[in-house]
Amino acid sequence: MSNAPTAIEVENVDFYYGNSKALHDISLKIPKGLVTAFIGPSGCGKSTLLRCFNRMNDLIDGTSVKSGKIKIHGVDIYSKEVDVIELRKRVGMVFQKSNPFPKSIYENIVYGLRLQGINDKKMLDEVVEKSLRGAALWDEVKDRLDDYATGLSGGQMQRLCIARAIAVEPEIILMDEPCSALDPIATMKVEELIDELKKKYTIVIVTHNMQQAGRCSDFTAFYYLGKLIEFDRTEKIFTNPSKQQTEDYITGRFG
Amino acid sequence: MQNKSNNPFLKVSTPAKRQETAFFWLFRIATYIIIAAAGYIFFDIAYKGVGVIFQLKAPFVNVPFLTEWPETLDIFKLPANQDMKMEVSQYARMTYENPKVNFVEKGTLEMVIFKSPEGVMKKVLPEQKEAFDADPISHGWSVLSERAVMQVFQLKEVSEIKIGNTLYRSLVDDNEGVPPLEHKTQVYAAGGIYPAIVGTVLLVVGSMIIALTLGVLCATYLSEYSRSGPIINFIRLSIMNLAGVPSIVFGMWGYAMFVLLFGWNVSLMAGWFTLAFMVLPIVITGSEESLRAVPQGFREGSLALGASKWQTIYKNVLPYALPGILTSSIMGIARIAGETAAIMFTASFVVRDELPWQVKHAGEFFFNGVMALPYHIFVVSARVPQNVYTEKSSMARHSSSWSSF
């Protein structure tokens, strides 16, 4: 299917919220250095799977991966030796609702670095500039780095969250509907940013916007009712899907 | 022109509408009753209290009331049938400073006692009195009306008494020669409430430090770390129930636990811990609520950047929960500051002559009781019956309020 090496390998994963099964026997290989989009109707499990990749679901009581394995760069991230903190440093996440901390823009960016004990002002300054440039936000905020991050516009806040995620230099960035609350122009900026970021990072993006998946992803996975229906190159999914359900969803016949 | 019967929006009285009006007025009247009651309470407190704490002369605050020790008020019934109220020491001072306007002037006293710098007390006959009256202070003599001193000696049944810095000795072997003034005592009706203020502040500060430390730790565990389950629910329920326990029960428990079992005696420490456990439910419930009010996004965002749980809580949850935690603790302060029953057996003294920190060893600071405002009110108003406020109830028990003399 792809020549790119695999970043995330999902093998026969069943996932439960308490007793209800949310993911049914999911298997897919997410290629490294490319953008993979997850699409599907609400409640189909795409966000759940995404949150499995950095074990964010651990925060919710009663959730578990009952069978199957998720490997990132060949390592099973649900094995007992895995330090979840190290995992999350390598697998960054941008959330649906932008969640800048109520601190200054500067402090938001360096939050992850301060956690690692890096307090060298010069180094932090460099990282802030690099991350903000990386998130295409530098020109807009360079003169007000000490302003509260919550005073930014919605699109700026989301890009700030992306900048915050790339400041700790992860290998994979997970994006959970990053543009769902943004207007088309802000969305366009984030999409341009995704194009830019994929040169360095593996990106997995959950989206409800099929045009967005078509525009900015290399691979697309379609989920329905907790099952992976189809996973293929984006052009193929959108032009010549092999499953009827996929075609129905993409053409808007249901969902 | 519109015909009445043609108007579809015409007001018609139906049972449902009458019920609506009735309930509206029921709610409204209930609210106004409460407002009236609350208004009266605050007005009454302000009206009567303002006169005690504030005054019209500079510095506009009744400083002695806030800075002096409580003193017992002696009321002497004078022949002119006018009660004269003064503190024991004031009584002596008055006759010393104004020998001309004391009872001597009124012809009820014939002799004056002087105290020489050598500490000897002398009886001065009326014919000698005038000479001393002219200039007693420059001679370095303290002067007291004999009657006042006699009264004091008689009341206290001692032959020595210290008033201010002056020691008086009775030269009269028996006081029978002086007919007693009619007299009654009002415990702590004079002076100020300084040591009680100090004690209450100490109790509140100490117990809030203990309660906040324990409470915030517990609330953090409950809301951030623990997984929900029957055990945690049971713990939570127990904490909530603790809030419903009457404070006298806490007082008895603190007495049994800290005063007797731990052997701390009636002390600041025992009071601190008793009060701390009493407000813990308020602090824990309030803290948990404010922790829950911190958006989940702050936690997730922080964890997704590779923060540990504790780093997340410390850097990104507690700072935003802090205002709410402090608000809830103010409720706790209000409860502690007014608590009588819980400190009655554990921390409060009726009277203590020195301030809590005027001790030889630091340990005594922690293991000594203090005076406290609510308990002081209790002592003044209820436990000692010879008080204007409880006079009526004591009148019922005794034929006359003067008969106790």
Image (cartoon, grey):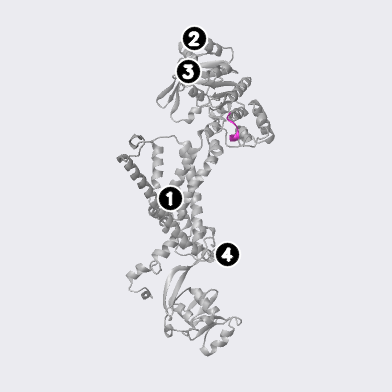
Q: Where is mark 4, residue-wise?
A: B59
Please say if B140 is above or below A88.
below
Of mark 4 and mark 1, the one earlier in the sequence is 4
Amino acid marked by disc 3: Tyr
Subunit under mark 4: B
Left or right of B5 on screen, residue A229: right
Please say if A42 is above or below B335.
above
In this rendering, the label closer to the viewer, 4 or 3: 4
On the same chain, marks 4 and 3? The answer is: no
Numbered tag placed on residue B278 in the rendering: 1
Count the marks: how many? 4
- Which residue occupies the foreground of this view, B160 or B262? B160
Q: State how far apart marks 4 and 1 are (Cα).
A: 39 Å
Q: State how far apart marks 4 and 2 are (Cα).
A: 91 Å
In this rendering, the label closer to the viewer, 1 or 3: 3
* Magenta part of the chain: A149-154
Q: Where is mark 2, residue-wise?
A: A242
- Which residue occupies the foreground of this view, B88 or A66? B88
* Residue B372: % across, % down: 47, 60
Amino acid marked by disc 2: Ser
In this rendering, the label closer to the viewer, 4 or 1: 4
Subunit under mark 2: A
Amino acid marked by disc 1: Met
* Residue A63: % across, % down: 44, 27
Please say if B46 is above or below A56.
below
On the same chain, marks 1 and 3? The answer is: no
Magenta stretch encompasses residue A150 = yes
Cβ atoms at labels 3 and 2 below 8 Å apart: no
